Image: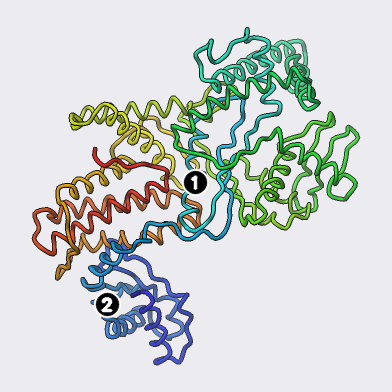
Amino acid sequence: MVFEQIAKSLQLFLEENYQLNFDATKIQLDPTRKEFEGDYTLVVFPLVKLMKTSPEKAGEMIGEYLQSNIDEVADYNVIKGFLNLSFTAEYWVKSLEKTLSDSAWFLPRNAQDLILVEYSSPNTNKPLHLGHLRNNFLGHSVSLIKAFAGNEVIKTQIINDRGVHICKSMLAWKRFGNDETPETSGLKGDKLVGKYYVIFDLELKKQVSGLVDSGLSEDDAKKEAPIMKEVQEMLVKWENGDEDVRTLWKTMNSWVYAGFEQTYERMGVSFDKLYYESETYTKGKQIVMDQLDGSKFFQKEDGSIWCNLESDSMDNKLLMRGDGTTVYMTQDVGTAVQRFEDYPNMTQAIYTVGDEQDYHFKVLFKILEKLGYNWAPNCEHLSYGMVDLPSGKMKSREGTVVDADDLMEDVVNAARASSEEKGKLEDLTQEEQDDLFEILGIGALKFFLLRVDPKKRMMFDPEESVSLNGDTGPFVQYTHARCRAVLRKAGEFDSGQPTSIADKERLLLRTLTSFRSEMDAAAEGMNPSTIANYCLELAKSYNQFYQSSPILKADGPERDFRLGLTKLTADTIQKSMSLLGIRVPERM
């Protein structure tokens, strides 16, 4: 490998000329920026002090040495402290041949560490919305990327199927539902339950308004509202196993699960293991009770139980209310413990949750550490920015959300309209057309949500999200379809060995051969946007090559070489997009 040769040659150069024992791992070699001439750039600045010379002089000396001692280095140029190296055409031709013949190039590395990736984790009182789409696409993609990098991955979610929010939907349905069901209403089960969550909020606001008019403060009015008191009573009954409450809870949750399953299927996401808050909260509750006599937890006069976090510069955390009911933190403690009992060899647990919960997970991990679990440092929060609308934040209780099902239907319809307008689908069956529209629409949506760095808050622009032009998923998908069309027309071909390669071919090859390093970077950073932007760069590089270099009309070795580039581009796009959970069509 030429990079290893460069490292060894640089070590020899420093030993021979400066009697220095230099650590080759400190060498920084990056692809040369497009505006400069070269293939890879060696950053010289770290060597300047050792060589006691200027950055330009150091670059010239090293460049001359490398060109003289490494056959693959054809030329070099120095710009300030950056040594730009150009490799020979023979090197790039061999790189293409080696990559095309490498049967493991697109295969995942052998699985070693066992990790768990949690995502989705919905509440069973409302349907999935736009925020859930970003969460699911991000978590599912990270699980695919981690598996490709050489991990055994357990995809999981914790279903928040109990608590005050669930009781709100239950009570509203009990009061105002008239025995309505998904079958009688024509609504998906999750949408039906979500409808009653909104109805509860409307009724609560009405009662609070009346109490405020009678002289109570708004905070006191919310506590004293009859419907809110009923909800608290229902929660206590649920935790005490009341048969009627539990029966209603099971019925309404079953409606929601059936609805979620339809949404997940269209999203293209799946899970290996499901956890339910209704089961894990009891483990958390028992852990809290077991520690009550120690120094970690304490009880207040009202009977509530707290974790002492003052010494850790955090607020004390409520774990159990005075009426004996539990909170989210109690359940999260129980879930974490249960997971490490289920998978004792697990080396990492990744929680895909929005950055609004940053403090929650900081507290959770600190509580687990205080409880003495040696695996606590293996828990990691994959925090991501929330999705805003032009009109502001989404609020489920007010019904101001972008519904996931509706949005997916919109983007598929947009793909249908755009494709039919271009009129190139006459020879496809209706079934094939419908599948193509699904691939394009859902692909556009996933790409839109994944190409933004997870840490960044993002604005959801409805028009931009369904656009099939520009730096989008369909642009990458179209490039793949273009490659496949070329290959279909070409038929069989051999490895081509041209005597020279053009700049656009060189740039494309450099992008193609960086595939594994880009995938590794995405896995290390748990950042699918690295792959999305790599796909865009690759698609642009191929299209520039396609416009400047005839493929099917080329002769002999040049034709075969360019077909090899085309095949590797198609295969690389297909694999890269699959790690984002996105399918690519054979034709468009």
Instruction: Determine which of the numbered discs, if any, sits on residue 87 in the image.
Output: none
Q: Label 1 crowding class (10 Å Cα cut-off): few <14, some 14-19, many 20+?
A: many
Q: Which residue is at the front of the view, 533 or 256?
A: 256
Q: Which residue is at the front of the view, 541 or 113?
A: 113
Q: Is residue 587 left or right of residue 392?
A: left
Residue 382 percent location from the top left of the image: 56, 48
Label whose residue precedes the other's in the sequence (1 or 2): 2
Residue 361 percent location from the top left of the image: 66, 46
Residue 514 percent location from the top left of the image: 35, 61
Residue 508 percent location from the top left of the image: 26, 59
Circle 2: element type: strand
Kindly report the distance in space between the C-alpha atoms of the residues bearing marks 1 and 2.
Answer: 38 Å
Q: Residue furthest top?
A: 178
Q: Quadrant of the C terminus?
A: top left
Residue 111 vs 131, above or below: the answer is: below
Amino acid type of the residue that numbered disc 1 sits on in the rendered structure: Pro
Instruction: Determine which of the numbered discs, if any, sits on residue 73 in the image.
Output: 2
State how the image is colored. Answer: rainbow
Q: Quadrant of residue 328?
A: top right
Q: Which residue is mark 1?
A: 454
